[in-house]
Amino acid sequence: MKYSNATNYALHTMVHLIRLPQNSTIGVQELAEFQKLSPTYLSKILTKLTKAGLIESTPGAKGGYKISKSPNEISFLDVIIAIEGDSKLFNCSLHHNEGCLIEEVMRQSEENMKSELESQLLIDIVKKMESGAEKTTGN
Amino acid sequence: MKYSNATNYALHTMVHLIRLPQNSTIGVQELAEFQKLSPTYLSKILTKLTKAGLIESTPGAKGGYKISKSPNEISFLDVIIAIEGDSKLFNCSLHHNEGCLIEEVMRQSEENMKSELESQLLIDIVKKMESGAEKTTGN
DNA sequence: GTATGGTTACTCGGATAAGTGGTGTCCGAGTTGTTCTGG
DNA sequence: CCAGAACAACTCGGACACCACTTATCCGAGTAACCATAC
């Protein structure tokens, strides 16, 4: 069990977008270049983020992507669900008479993780980065 | 991101083994039958549990599997690591100047989940099952 | 100068393919208990 | 009755195939800004 790399790219992209001056857009190639991955693949990820309502795209020349919601409404969990989907991590395939006790425990542990991810906002990361090391552009 | 089915099978098998009378062994086919999966595949899973030191096998006729450690020392996390491995869920592939802040958050949320799984013991599930519904064999 | 058409710079989405890991089967090898057989 | 061999019931491990998903590429379509040309 691992997060897909797409989740990694999505999170870094979101942080990058939040750091942008408001209402300015940025193209796929520029986003791809700074993460050292192909623009075509990144666009797939951006499509998912768009469908989740986290970012929005303006087509045509001078087009690109920008944040759709207010930065302090976007949590880690939002981005992760946009990429990974929101299906449960564990599903008991056996058919029990009633609820599976094992599944209950697994679900509880999953909730513990998600509640942490839900409380962590991307804007906090950005603030830390900008206060911590100003000289480095380090996304 | 999902747990593999093998983890599901492993957990149910462990619970089943714990419910067995002490020092009695049970064969693969019997374990496989009650979970409705092929013995050959289940043996792969049992091999992993054996290597993790959770169960032990006695070869030859009248052989089979049994719990290796005391039941109240076995947590959910032990079983999960035995099957899934103990690699981190999230790895930042970008090379930053220093530690990745995103990775830090992800790691923290993972720890929240693991600490829950570590505190939950299989024996607690067994106790609940035996006190709750005695008529049903249903694990 | 204004309108029209073409070019360019983008996003969008489908089709496709390689790579990887989970799932599952097959088979041969090793081990131990049981049974059979010869003395 | 006893010893040793054959057999059966198991686990163990490697090799292999299949399938699903991730990762990644290519290409055509749609859209909007920009530019050139003609009137």
Image: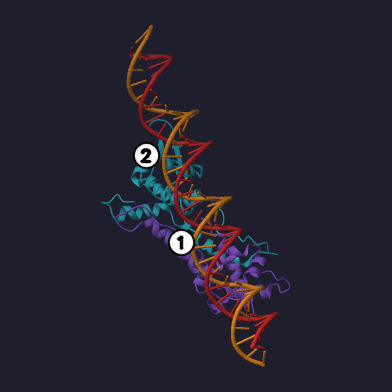
Chain colours: A purple, B cyan, C orange, D red
Relative to B28, residue A99 above or below: below
User: Disc 1 marks which residue?
Assistant: A109
Image coords of residue B25 (percent x, y): 38, 38
Q: Is residue A98 left or right of residue B121?
A: left
Image coords of residue C6 (percent x, y): 63, 75
**Circle 2 — which element?**
helix
Q: CA distance from mark 1 to mark 2?
A: 32 Å
Q: Is residue D12 left or right of residue D27?
A: left
**Circle 1 — which element?**
helix
Identify the amino acid type marked 2.
Gln
Image coords of residue D9 (percent x, y): 36, 31
Q: Residue, x 66% and y 72% (percent of image)?
A: A129
Q: Residue, x 44% and y 37% (percent of image)?
A: B57
Q: Looking at the image, can residue A40 be seen?
A: yes
User: The disc numbered 1 marks a residue on which chain?
Assistant: A
Query: Residue B29: which disc?
Result: 2
User: The disc numbered 2 marks a residue on which chain?
Assistant: B
Q: Nearer the viewer, mark 1 or mark 2?
A: 2
Q: Residues within 10 Å of mark 2 (few under 14, many from 20)?
A: some
Q: Residue, x 51% and y 70% (percent of image)?
A: A78
Q: Looking at this view, name the residue that lies furthest to the left.
A: B135
Image coords of residue A36 (percent x, y): 66, 63
